[in-house]
Image (tube, rainbow, N blue to C red):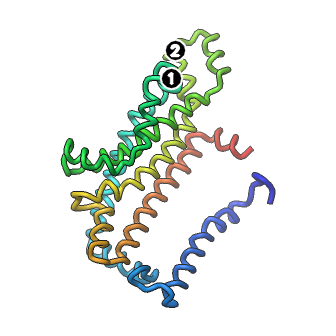
Amino acid sequence: MKIREPITHSRYIGLSILPFIIVLVLWGALTYSGFIQPFFLPSPSAVLRSLLEAMKSGGIFRDIWDSTYRVLMGFLLAAVLSIPLGLLIGCYKPFEAFAEPINNLVRYLPVVSFIPLCILWIGIDDNEKVAVIFLGTFFQLLVLVADAARAVSQDLLNTSYTLGARQHQVILKVVLPASLPQIYDALRVSMGWAWSYLVVAEIVAANSGVGHFIIQSQRFLETSNVIAGILIIGVLGLAFDLFFAYTSMWFFPWNVKRARS
């Protein structure tokens, strides 16, 4: 192996699948051998049975739909607000001085500490869950978008000024297109954060959602259902991650070629 040396597509796929096989084998070895009791870690077949039972009852599909809706709404709201604000912070020092220090303070605060305030201000319906996911993604995404705007070459800006472009034209026609691949990667990362905050959002006053399914299962000591719910979130998150990965290659083919060169 050499640094950054490409490999064949079939080998790449095989190496991607291998970690899942290793985890499944180790999981089976620890549970079927009796080394770990089913109460603490149920076997893969027990988790599969729990998952099939949840699918047979049909309730899990409503939970998946409700959770996906909450994640998408919180994520989209964070993206719509953070992209223009991040561009302003990355382009103008006064905006950076005004917004970045307070943003850096808030983004280190634990999101779970905002749940009582969200319930007090918003209530206990879906809007509260969306707000928690928004708080968990917006402030982090704002930093990534601002960094993407700052990374645009100064030569591009100087060239656009030389050609007579005004400041708003430079932002819309130079900075934004040049930073879009990096912003799209930031959206991909923030989608992962949105799914990771799902259980936090659904831990209080929820009557549906995969997070609610996990919490209810934990209360009744149904460990297999807990793991099944965790796997559902993992699969949904992986599906969205693959969506961003493949659409990125479609939207920005030049960026993929540059990364491979």
Q: Secondary structure at mark 2?
A: helix
**Which residue is located at x 46 percent, y 52 percent?**
192
Q: What's under tag 1, amino acid-wise?
A: Leu
| 162 vs 75, nearest the viewer | 75
Residue 51 in the image: x percent, y percent?
36, 75
Q: Position of residue 173 (x, y in %)?
A: 54, 22
Q: Is residue 177 left or right of residue 50?
A: right
On residue 167, the disc is: 2
What residue is drawn where x is 37% and y is 68%? 229
Give the Cα distance between marks 1 and 2: 9 Å
The kind of residue on which mark 2 rests is: Gln
- Above-or-below relation of 258 to 211: above
- Residue depth check, mark 1 versus mark 2: number of the one nearer the observer: 2
Quarter of the C terminus within the rendering? top right
Q: Nearer the viewer, residue 244 or 135?
A: 135
Task: Tell me where residue 190 appears, x and y as whole percent.
Answer: 46, 46
Secondary structure at badge 1 equals helix
Instruction: Work out which quarter of the rendered image holds the N terminus and state it.
Output: bottom right
Residue in view at x 36 percent, y 55 percent: 198
Q: How far across and how far down the image is residue 215, in percent? A: 30, 67
Nearest to N terminus: mark 1 or mark 2: 2
- Which residue shows up at 42% across the image and 39% down it? 139
Q: Residues within 10 Å of mark 1 (few under 14, many from 20)?
A: few
Q: Which mark is residue 172?
A: 1
Q: Is residue 20 left or right of residue 72?
A: right
